[in-house]
Image (spheres, grey):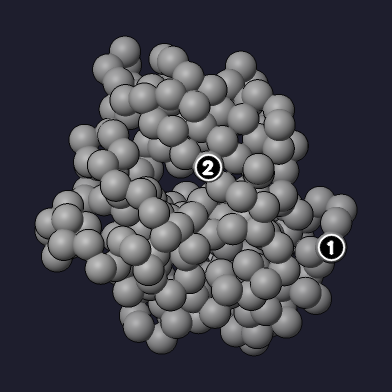
Amino acid sequence: MSLRLEGLSAGYGGIPVLHGVDLEVGEGEVVALLGRNGAGKTTLIKAVMGLVRVYAGQVVYWGQELTPLPSYRRAQLGLGYVPDDRRIFPELTVRENLLIAHRPGPWSLEKVYRMLPRLQEIEHRRGGLLSGGEQQMLTIARTLMTNPKLLLLDEPTEGLAPLIVEEIARLVLELKREGMPVLLAEQNLRFTGRVADRAYVLETGEVRLSGTMDELLHKEEVAALLSL
């Protein structure tokens, strides 16, 4: 099991947002977190990464408990975090943004360019001059350059054009074929239905439903919980 959360409660300023969440991500599995805005999806991703306070429970990553560790140690152990606000370096070129993140491993600049050829076409363009979709691709590619063992994707398709969403879906499916486990926070049910194996539906910081995507796509409760 690449990731396991046991009874996780976490939040901000002493106020819990998550309440007793249990979750698992298997080796080579793509697992989605579904829910409305404010359901706790981003808080859960940040709790795994060590960016919010955990009040109870455990975060277990490849058999090692991460709960006491700061975020930089979790990154060193191979957690790759793609935040929803991208955080690229606007004054650096695409190539420089990628190279600055590189750590030894199978992911290289050449491999990233093969997976996302658009980035090679614009490799000398500054990050601040990219479109929103190009910035999102760069953010994911930069995280891959750290050679993660598990990828955390927070709302990767939010506000993007359909062609870019299709490109990100293709990339996630390719990562799955390569055996990369992915935990994905997302509201786009069509996108998650295509790329995810299983999902957990959150409401007010608790897991209300879980199952395979095939099971959840046929449940009326899922549409109600997502306000679709």
Question: Which x, y percent locates residue 128?
Answer: 49, 65
**Which one is closest to the eye, mark 1 or mark 2?**
2
Question: Depth check: 8 or 49 in front?
Answer: 8
- Compared to 62, does 227 lie above or below? below
Q: Which residue is mark 1?
A: 106
Task: Tell me which amino acid carries mark 1.
Answer: Pro
Q: In screen coordinates, is 215 left or right of 131?
A: left
Query: What mark, if any, has residue 3 been given in the picture?
Result: none
Quick check: can you spot residue 29?
Answer: yes
Q: Residue at x 35, y 44 (%)?
A: 41
Question: Which x, y percent locates residue 157?
Answer: 38, 67
- Quadrant of image for the C terminus: bottom left
Q: CA distance from mark 1 to mark 2?
A: 25 Å
Quick check: can you spot residue 92?
Answer: no
Q: Which residue is mark 2?
A: 24
Question: Which x, y percent locates residue 61?
Answer: 65, 35
Quarter-wise, where is residue 115 in the image?
A: bottom right
Badge 2 element: strand
Label 1 with label 2: CB-CB less than 8 Å: no
Question: Depth check: 185 or 196 in front?
Answer: 196
Badge 1 element: loop
Q: In screen coordinates, is 106 left or right of 6?
A: right
Q: In screen coordinates, is 166 left or right of 74?
A: left
Task: Tell me which amino acid carries mark 2.
Answer: Glu
Q: Residue at x 63, y 79 (%)?
A: 116
- Quadrant of image for the N terminus: top right
